[in-house]
Image: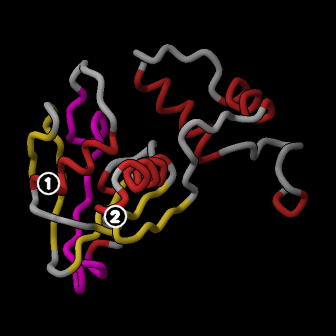
Amino acid sequence: MTKIDINGAQLAYDESGTGTAVVLLHAGIADRRMWRGQIPALAQRHRVIALDLRGYGDSELPPAPFAHHDDVIGLLDALGIEQAALVGCSFGGRVAVDTALAHPERVSALALFGAPVSGNEWSEETEQLWDELVGDVDPEDFAATAAGEVRFWVVGPRTAGRSPPSRR
C-alpha cells in the first residue's frame, strides 16, 4: 500500500503491473481490497491501481468539501497517467461515471458493475426497504451502521415471504 496527498487528503492505493492504466474503484460497502482477486490477472497486461476512495479503507476523510471524481483525476495527475480505463462497482461505478462526465479526455474506457447514476433518487419501495432493513441508525455507531448496510446491500429482502419463490 502507498499513500499520496491528493486534493488535501491522504489517499491509499495499491499499484502493480505495467501497460495501459486501469483504475479500480470499489463499492461503497468495501475498499480497495475487494479487487485483490482480479489484480494479478489484470496486472499481467496493465498498470493496475486500486484506490481507496476518500473516507474508505486506509484513505482519510478531512472535513473539507470534495468530489471523488476530482480525487481520481488528482491521482492520475500525481502518477503521470494521461488516460485510464476505470472499473467501478456500485458506488465506485458512480464515481467512474462522474469522472468520465467531468473529464472525458482522461477516461479511455468504463467497466461498470451495478453502478448508480449521480442524482438518481431511490423509489418509494427502495426507501421503505431501507427503513425496514436499516432503520434509524446513528451514523456515529459504526458497528450498527455496518450491520445495517450489510442487511440492505448484501443480504437484501431475503426474509420469509419476500424472496422469490425459487429461493423459499
Residue 27 visible to the viewer: no
Asked whether, in this view, residue 56 is left or right of residue 10, the answer is right
**Residue 95 among magenta residues:** no
Q: Residue 111, percent across and down? A: 46, 68
Q: Which residue is mark 1?
A: 77
| Residue at x 10%, y 59% (from the top left corner) | 79
Q: Which residue is mark 2?
A: 107
| Residue at x 49%, y 26% (from the top left corner) | 145
Question: Which residue sits furthest bottom?
Answer: 45
Instruction: Classify 10 Å Cα crowding around label 2: few (below 14), some (14-19), many (20 and above).
Output: many
Q: Residue 146, percent across and down? A: 47, 32
Q: Is residue 116 above or below residue 20?
A: above
Q: Residue 11's quadrant in the figure?
A: top left
**Residue 42 among magenta residues:** yes
Q: Which quadrant is the C terminus positioned in?
A: bottom right
Tell me the element at label 1: helix
Instruction: Classify 10 Å Cα crowding around label 1: few (below 14), some (14-19), many (20 and above).
Output: some
Q: Earlier in the sequence, mark 2 or mark 1?
A: 1
Q: Residue 140's quadrant in the figure?
A: top left
Q: Is residue 45 above or below residue 65?
A: below
Q: Viewer-proximal residue, 122 or 110? A: 110
* Start-end of magenta stretch: 40-61
Amino acid at the residue labelled 1: Asp
